[in-house]
Image: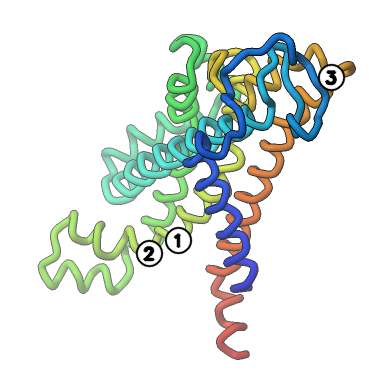
Amino acid sequence: MKRKLILCSALALGLVLAAWFAEALCPFDPYEQNFAAALQPPSWEHWFGTDRFGRDMLSRVIMGARVSIFSALILVGIISVTGTAIGVFCGCSRRADAVLMRLADICLAFPGMVFGLAVAAVLGGGIQNAVLALAAVSWPKYARIARSQTLAVKNADYIAAARLAGDSFWQVIGRHILPNIAGTILVTAMLDVGTMMMELAGFSFLGLGAQPPTADWGSMMSEGRSMLQLYPWVIFTPGIGIVLSVAIFHLLGETIRDHMDPKNRTGRRRE
C-alpha cells in the first residue's frame, strides 16, 4: 500500500512539476505559427506532429498542462475550502443550516454540468469564468459532507470536555472538528481533481473555457475535431494528456482513500 501511495504521489508530483516548468520543457514556442509546416504528422522533429497553423503539438500539450492542471487544482481548492467552511458552520448553527443548506439543495436540484454551462454563459468565456462557474455549482457536495461529519462529532465527549475547559466556538472548530473531518475532505478533493479537469476541458471544448490561442487541452481538441479523420494526431495528443492526468489523480485519490481506511490500517498493524 505504501509503495502504491509513493508511486501515485510521485506521478502526480511529476505532472505538477512538468506543468510548472512547462516553458522550459517545450522544444518549440507553442504559439509560434509556421504555415509551411502545417499539419505535419509525428516525426523526429515534431514528435506529436503540428496543427493547422504549424505549431508544434508536443509543445502545446506541455504548455496546455499548465492551464488544465492548475485550473483544476485551483478549482478543487476553492470548492473544498468554501464548501467545508459552509458545512462546518451549518453543522454548528441551526439558523445557518436552515438557510445555507436550502441554497445547497437548490444547486443540487439542477444537473451540475448544465447549471455550470448556464453560469459560464452568463459570465462569458475565459478559463477564469469557467472556474468561477464550476465553483458556484460544485461547493454543495463538500458542504454536505462537512455538515454530516460535523454533526457526527460535535456531540462527542471530547468536544464537551473542550468546552468545559474553556475553548471558544472557533477554538472547538479549529482544534477538534476540522482535524477530524479533514481526512474525508482530502480524499474527496483528490478524487475530484480528475473530474474537474474533465469538466473544465468540456467547457473549453464548447467555447466557454480557455480561448484560442491559449494552449488548453479542451480548446485544442475543439480546434481539431473537424480534422479527426485526416489528421488524428491533432485531437489525439491533447486527449492523451487528459486521459493520463485524470487517471493519475484518480489513482492517487483512491490510494489515499484506501490508505486512510481504518480497516486497512488495522490490518497493517496486525501484520
Question: What quarter of the picture does the C terminus occupy?
Answer: bottom right
Amino acid beneath label 3 = Tyr
| Structural distance between the alpha carbons of marks 1 and 3 | 45 Å
- Percent of width and height locating residue 225: 77, 16
Task: Decide which of 259, 86 is in the foreground and name it.
Answer: 259
Which amino acid does the dot numbered 1 rest on? Gly
The mark lying in front, picked from 1 and 2, is: 1
Is residue 251 found left or right of 193 in the rendered image?
A: right
Label 3 and label 2: CA atoms lie apart by: 52 Å
Under circle 3, the secondary element is loop
> Which residue is tagged 3?
231
Horizontally, is 206 left or right of 97 in the view? right
Residue 4 x %, y %: 64, 67
* Amino acid type, residue under disc 2 in the picture: Asn
Residue drawn at point x = 33 percent, y = 32 percent: 99
Decide: few, some or many residues near mark 3? Use Cα within 10 Å; few <14, some 14-19, many ≥20: some
Query: Going from the N terminus, do you reach mark 3 or mark 2 first?
Result: 2
Disc 1 target residue: 183
Comparing 86 with 224, the one in front is 224
